[in-house]
Amino acid sequence: MNENFFKAPSPEREWVLGFIFADGCISLTKNIHFTLGLAQKEPEILQKIKNLLQTEAPIKRINKTGCHILRINNKKLVRDLLQFGLHPRKSLTIEYPENIKYHSHFIRGFFDGDGCVSLIRYQYTNKISLDKGDKIKLYRAITFHSASKQFLIELCNHLPYVNPFKNHLRKEKGNCYRLGFYGKPFVEKIVEFLYKDSSDEIRLSRKYKRCVLQAEN
């Protein structure tokens, strides 16, 4: 187990941190057990994190939900994570950490956990055209999701090519917020930012392929 993994900044550290901010949880129990839990429907990203941390902790599948979970019990590791502002029941209150050096890798890690790239069908009526019937437009979109509005505001400030005076943030159902960018130019630029200098060891393959497909076509 590499207990010093979160000590020094590196692309690998930032990517894992980003994913923990999205889909990780920390628990501190009364008997001084410090636990980091990571859950995903697909085991690939958990296996990559396991390899980076050099841990023997097993990846287990929860049959009821179909999710896979990697649970690591390590006091030193979790104490280092607390320095980034992570804490139990973090969803509503997390903020973008100040001590991040490689922002593209951190944001890509968060995107691998709570981000999406998609093609949106938009149906509208063209009142000017002589053609009858509704029209269909397709929009490329890239979005980030969190229950912490402040976290998404701060994340947006670290994205390139984004107009800071335009409101990209929307409230969704429940306590969730969506930070979204629409149109091929936006998607191309953000995908380039996210995956520049990345490698297969520190990205989710499925999302990478989908992002490249949406950006290039």
Image (spheres, rainbow, N blue to C red):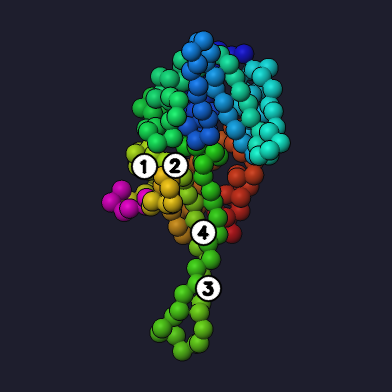
Question: Is label 3 or label 2 in front?
Answer: 2
Indicate the secondary structure of the residue bearing disc 1: helix
Query: Which secondary structure type mostly characterizes the magenta part of the structure?
Result: loop
Are the residues flagged by discs 2 and 1 in contact, CB closer than 8 Å?
A: yes
Counting from the top left corner in percent of width and height, residue 30 is at: 48, 13
Most foreground residue, 129 or 149: 149
Please tell me whether residue 70 is drawn above or below residue 153 in the rendered image: above
In the image: residue 101, left or right of residue 58: left
Label 2 – label 1 distance at C-alpha: 7 Å
Are the residues flagged by discs 3 and 2 in contact, CB closer than 8 Å?
A: no
| Residue identified by numbered label 3 | 136
- Residue 189 in sight here: no
Label 3 – label 4 distance at C-alpha: 13 Å
Indicate the secondary structure of the residue bearing disc 4: strand
Are the residues flagged by discs 1 and 4 in contact, CB closer than 8 Å?
A: no
Three-letter code, disc 1: Lys
Magenta residues, as a range?
164-169
Counting from the top left corner in percent of width and height, residue 214 is at: 57, 55
Tag 2: Cα neighbours inside 10 Å, few (<14), some, or many (≥20)? many
Which residue reaches farthest bottom?
A: 130
| Residue identified by numbered label 4 | 140
Most foreground residue, 38 or 209: 38
Indicate the secondary structure of the residue bearing disc 2: strand
Q: Is 166 part of what is drawn in magenta? A: yes
Q: Which mark is residue 146?
A: 2
Residue drawn 50% across and 87% down?
131
